[in-house]
Amino acid sequence: MSRGSKTAIGCLVAFIVLTVLSAWAVWSPLGFGPWYYDQMARSKSDKGDTQAAAEYWQRAVQQRPNDTTLRLWLGWAHEKNGEDAAALAEYQEAFRLDSELTAALAYQAHLHLSNDDYKAAAEILQQAQEQAPDHPDVQLLQGQLLMAQGQAEQALPYLEKAVEIGTDKPNAYHSLAEAYAELGREDEALAAYRVGARRGEKRCKDHLAAIGDRLAVEEATPGESHREREDRAEGETEASACCDSGAAPGLAFMGVFFAFYFVFLAGAMIMWALGVLCLWDCAKRDFPDPNTRAIWSVLLMLIHWVGVIAYYFVVYRHNDPPHLPRNDPPAGTRSVDQPE
C-alpha cells in the first residue's frame, strides 16, 4: 500500500473517531449534553418560556440525575408552570441527594407559603433554621411567613437580618417596607421601597408610582435582572424589556456574531471550491491502484475541508503520484476519428 493510501485511510479513521467522540460529548452524562440542555433551558427561561425550559432541564436531569442544581432549576420551572406537585418532588429529591442543601428546604418552604400552607412552611423553616440559622433565604422566608400570619412585629427582626446578611432577593425590601408600614415607621418604609425599586422589585416601583414619589428609579443592570429572574422566594415576574445598559453589549455581541458568520460562510464557499478542484485533480492522478483514488474521493466528500488540507499536503504539494499521461497522438499522425 502506498504512502498516499495509508494517509487517506488514517484521515478517514480519524474522522470516524472524532465523530464518535463528538456524539459521546453530546449524549454522555460526562459530556456536554447536560450543560447544553441547561444553557438552552436558561435561555428559554429568560424569554419567559418556562414550559420549554422545564423540558430542557428534564433532559439534563435524565442525563445527570444526581445534580442537585439541575433539580432545583427543574423544580423552579415546574413551580412557575403551576405544577406544584412536580416542583415539590424535585426539591425533596435534591435535599435527599444532599442533606446539607439548605436552598432545597428554602424552596420547599416557599412553595408551601405560596399555597398558604403555613403549617408545612413553618415545619420546613424550623428544620432549615436548625441547619443554617444565618442563611438569608431562611431569614427572609421566616419573616414573610410571619407577615402572612399578621405578625409584623415578630417578622421585622427576620426581615432586617435577611437584608443585613445580604440577600439577593429584591422582594425582601418590599416585605421589609410592608413591615415598617404596618408598624407606623413610614420614613423607614419609604426608604425600603426605594431600595427595592432600585433593585428591580416591581411592587416597590408600583408603590412609589402610586404615592407620586419623584424618585428616579434606575434601570437594573444585567446582573440585577438575573437576580430578579432567580427570585424564587417570591416568584416575581422577570424583567419584561431590555434595559438601556444592556443594549450596547447586546448590539456588540450581535455584530461580532454576524462578522464571524460571514467569515465562516466565505470560508465554507472557498473550501467547497477547493474541494471540487481537489476531486478533479484526484481523477487525473496516476494512483498505483484504483482503491487509493476511491479512498481519497470518499475522504474529500465526507470530511471535506480536512480532506482538502490532507490532500494538498500529501498529494498535490509533492505531486505524488504524478498526473496521468495525456494520450495525444504523435506528431505527423492522425487519430481514428480524424477525417482525411
Image: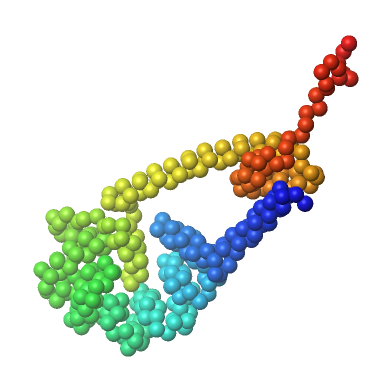
Where residue 255 sits, quadrant-wise, is: top left
Query: Which quarter of the rendering shows the C terminus?
Result: top right
Q: Position of residue 178 (x, y in %)?
A: 20, 71
Q: How many marks?
A: 0
- Viewer-closest of 4 and 35: 4
- Viewer-closest of 136 and 323: 323
Where residue 312 sits, quadrant-wise, is: top right
Q: Residue at left 43%, top 58%?
A: 43
Residue 237's place in the image compared with 130, above or below, is: above
Q: Residue at left 35%, top 46%?
A: 252
- Viewer-closest of 81 and 132: 132
Q: Position of residue 240 (x, y in %)?
A: 34, 55
Left or right: where does residue 102 sit relative to residue 162?
right
Q: Residue at left 10%, top 68%?
A: 187
Residue 39's place in the image compared with 149, above or below, is: above
Q: Position of residue 98 (x, y in %)?
A: 44, 82
Left or right: where does residue 160 sit relative to residue 24?
left
Q: Position of residue 295 (x, y in %)?
A: 74, 48
Q: Residue at left 12%, top 74%?
A: 184
Res. 170 visible in picture: yes
Res. 159 visible in picture: no
Left or right: where does residue 9 sit relative to residue 145?
right
